[in-house]
Image: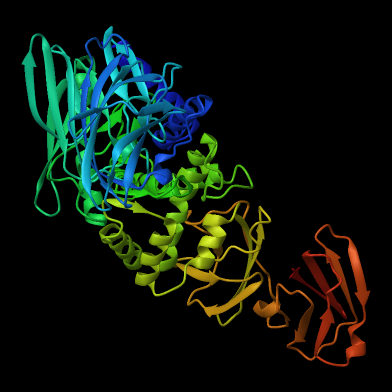
Amino acid sequence: MKTLNIIIAVLLTLNITAQNKTQPSYLCSESKKNLFKKISALNQTKYKTETDFAYDVKHYKLNLLFEDINNKYIQGEITCTFETKIDNFNQIAFDLSDYLTVDSVIFRQNKLTNYTLADNELIINLETDIPVNTIDSVSIFYQGIPNAQNSDSFKQTTHNGVPVIWSLSEPYGARDWWPCKQSLYDKADSVDIYITNPEEYKAASNGLLISETTSNGMKTAHWKHRHPIDTYLIAVAVTNYAVYSDYVTLSNGETLEVLNYVYPENLTYAQENTPNVLDVLQLYGELFIPYPYVDEKYGHAQFSWGGGMEHQTMTFLVAFSHMLMAHEAAHQWFGDYVTCKSWHDIWLNEGFATYLDGMTHEHNLNDDNISFNEWKLDNINDIVTLPNGSVYVTDTTYAENIFNYRLSYQKGAMVLHMLRKKIGDDAFFGGIKNYLNDPNIANGCATTADLQYHLEQTCGCSLQEFLNDWYYGEGYPSYQIYYSQNEDKNVTLTINQSQSHPSVDFFEMTVPVKFEGIEKDTVIWFNNTYNGQQFNFNIDFQITSAIFDPEHDIISSQSTISEIDTFNKSNKITLSPNPATNKITITFKEKIIPDKVIIFNSNGKQITEFNPGKYASYKFEYNISKLPPGIYYITFYADSDELTEKFIKI
């Protein structure tokens, strides 16, 4: 019989799945938004150390004591090794919650007394001037109850009656439980984390477990991570974990340990499911670059928060579904190894992770029987539920903007897919590999401009207009496509477009159409750069039907594709161009001039009638500029014959 915790987790998963098949990303989005809201309510989204104090973090040593994990009380010693970036550096600042108490500050073996903690900022007067480019360190001793008003950045609860403590710092929560420089683009070069707790519990964290020692009923775990790491990705979790490992051989031949810290009551469930991430890690390494931390580990630590969090080398998860593991594992490349440089560019984390989860469907690694085409369609259907919204986050002070599931996750993922379709697989994957390998980006931070540069280098094209439309612009297009085929199998196709939001006057994109015949079919991509664009080409079979965007590769809504019937099939008459804006040319292939011509609208109402005899020609032009846009029928009467042709006014 499954435990209550597993039942709750499964019911939660089923409920979200019923709402949206891509629910792990949804859980990630909603949980992070809720966390951000709580932090925002505490007025803790502001931090100053990123710009006000010029130092570069080299190393953190966290020495944390949890004497009783039945409560949230923490005692800690944090040593920050830093390099000064200005001359006469004499003051250093850290982000730290006002709910914590600083006991002492040690600098060069001396106890400092000139420091203040106010407005969630610890300012320390170093009492000396330090030259530029000097490496030094300072230690801070502190204690207290983190985030007393119940933010989830540091949480104490229970599972199966057993206490558990965990941290979750994204985006601004690290200072709730330790003094740090809470900056996206100042990564510590490495970190040592010592966690002391009652001996019956185990502590999970980043990097490699160097040692576990026990003394006087207390156990100390030493974790060491030797790679650059962002502040919000440093994490700890403590409870009565059961521990086991899975192993995978990567494409470069190296063996990676996947270390799992799980609730004992969920051990069998976890052991049945965590191996599903092994093929995913192989896939990501083959598509992009090898797993960045193969010299240490990848891992999972279970916690009771409603989703997952991509802590570097040790993802925290509530449950072990394939899609949630795939999404969070993707962050090791996109979010951890390369982190967005500002929250405006959160899609570089969440859009990529969502798209990589989608690619597990493309490569048939998922266990939910959802095809890649279904996955794309699910995302598109959600994206177009509202007419507005950009992937670029204009206002980062609101959680709904940064972690907006529809925009940062789903639209971000589909924009990546559309980039892939626009420039081709070789340029797309090659550009992203170069992006990850760029020494100015690898193990650091990036902007959308960095990604754009590398994709443009591999495709040899400009992507600025594409990004203006699809990344910075809001909304999406609706397409109205018309085609006709004559007896020589020559095809004329016209693409019209309307937009859901006025921020974009036209969405440039390559547009796919599938043409079907009795025994053949083909897909053609049209580079659509302006409204009313017409394409002429030949297909070597008779078209019986056509499908717009057959594999759901582009974001659009309420798009249509229609065949225009033409008298070419009876060799009597042609109308061109069709669709038309100002005039149509009517050509009779037989030497017959109709007695009269009547134009009807799509409701059958007569619009006009005229006698073409006055043109005294078998080919003449007719002005339609004053007709409203729409579908019209033009009927020609000659003796006992009656012929009707459809045309489109755009």
Q: In this view, does 537 lie to the left or right of 5?
A: right
Could you tell me which residue is drawn at 52 percent across and 70 percent down? 526
Residue 455 rendering spot, x and y as whole percentages: 38, 65
- Residue 325 shows in this picture: yes
Tally of numbered tags: 0
Quadrant location, the N terminus: top left
Could you tell me which residue is drawn at 54 percent across and 69 percent down? 543
Residue 648 rendering spot, x and y as whole percentages: 74, 68
Image quadrant in which you'd find residue 67: top left
Residue 541 rendering spot, x and y as whole percentages: 49, 74
Say above or below: 7 vs 90.
above
Say above or below: 45 vs 625.
above
Say above or below: 614 vs 82.
below
Quadrant location, the C terminus: bottom right
Could you tell me which residue is drawn at 24 percent across and 46 percent down? 228
Residue 131 rendering spot, x and y as whole percentages: 26, 51
